[in-house]
Image (spheres, grey):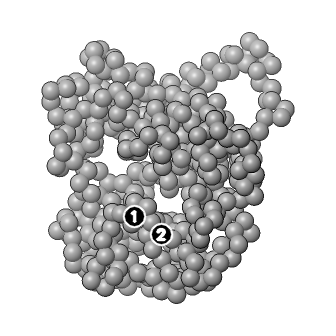
Amino acid sequence: MHNGGVSASPIKYMNLCVREHVPADVDLVIIEYAVNQMLPDKSIAKSDPVQQYERLVRKLIRFPNRPAIILLQTFSWSRGFNRIAHNSWSSFFETPEDHFAVVAKYYGLPSLSLRDAIFHNVLRLERGYAISDVLGDCKQTDLDRNAKPEPGPGLCRHPNSFGHGLLANLTINYLIEAFDAIHADPSQNRPEPHWEIPIPMYNFNEPREGDKRCYRAESLHDIVVDKGGWEYIVEGTSANPKPGYAAYTPGKAITLQVDSRPASNMTAKHGADVLAMKISIGYLQSYEHMGKAALSCENCKCEPYGESLHSSKEDELGRRLIDAHMDLRESTLGMWFMKISEHAECRIKLETVEDTTSGEHKFKITNIVLGELPGEEVDGFYLQSEKQKSYVGVDDSFRR
């Protein structure tokens, strides 16, 4: 048994660095991201989290032992504790798990839901199913729709030992049923001789395996060329360590150096002016103590894209500001995405600044991921493997 989970991390991180956390010879993988993933604000057809989820599943399916995969869905009972918005309990449909279940249906995977198992028990106030019986971070005992959730040390979303027992029972009962079915009919244990992984549910959503470099924990030391007043710290607990480089006052500038040239032969080499590679900066986001960092690049060009572009502003020096403060009362992993050009010594500098939303200035880097992401257009063509290109000729009208 191996726990490869990274606390408070989004799907997009594990999708990029799954091989750093899951052993190659695994036989069974249980995926749980419904509790940490915000409810998608777009339809399934345009949902980035669901596309990320599919890429993660496709990577795991290709592990050497072709592992069995179970989607285990934990329910977030509260909509969150935004300091501005009204706090309230989640409705039955306010969860990303129904979106993730589409991936399960497409690939024929089981999706086990804690919400489906106990939601009505909780509503009926059945003995043993009070909110405080199931969760370890909520003070209230009942799900009162007329009252705001009252959190304990957390967010009314993390199961306690009994809640984890329910999740375990969901999984164990499913496996027992599967084994019983095989015992009753041994032919069900025979894999289809010519079964192939279907084409991606989303166009151009084949994950790229060849060129991904993940730096986290102690491997961050390999790319830090100037600490500039930042220090390597390990927060959290021994069972759940949270390492990274942090600064606490303005004017501290750390410099990271990576080789941004693609190592894979699936992508043609581009010139120094073409933003053909992608890099993500993982950082701690929290509702208290956090500040802002200004980002700049040397030897290579870089520019944010997607949500990182739309949610950021420039300072007076033209540097992009990353704000680690969030109103939601939680601490989680933020990911800042940039397109960068190729260079053997691409340098990325992060400097803490005076401007702050929280009144404090802490900024903590937890990981750096370099690679090529699918579906991105560069100079009029898509970054895609030869196998992806072969999909273009397939009649895929049923997916439109």
Residue at image x 53%, y 49%?
52
User: With respect to residue 113, does 285 lie above or below?
Assistant: below
Q: Position of residue 273 (x, y in %)?
A: 56, 82
Please provide percent x and percent y for residue 228.
37, 85
Q: Residue at x 44, y 40 (%)?
A: 43
Identified by mark 1, the residue type is: Ser
Residue 120, can we see it?
yes
How far apart in space, not on screen, are marks 2 and 1 (Cα)? 8 Å
Q: Quadrant of residue 365?
A: bottom left
Residue extending furthest right?
193
Residue toward you, 206 or 161: 206
Instruction: Find numbered disc 2 in the image and state the secondary structure of the residue it sits on.
Output: strand
In the drawing, what numbered circle is on residue 338?
2
Contact, mark 2 vs mark 1 (Cβ under 8 Å): yes
Residue at x 77%, y 14% (from the top left corner): 185
Q: Which secondary structure, mark 1? A: helix
Q: Tag 2: residue type?
A: Met
Q: Nearer the viewer, residue 395 or 69?
A: 395
Taking the view exactly as shown, the residue that stands out farthest to the top is 184
Badge 1: residue crowd in 10 Å (few <14, some 14–19, many ≥20): some
Res 122 label: none
Rendered location of residue 317, percent (x, y): 31, 85
| Residue that badge 1 annotates | 308
Quadrant including the N terminus: top right
Residue 234 in view (yes/no): no
Q: Position of residue 210 (x, y in %)?
A: 69, 62
- Of residue 329 and residue 6, the one placed in the foreground of this image is 329
Above or below, 176 against 219 in this view is: above
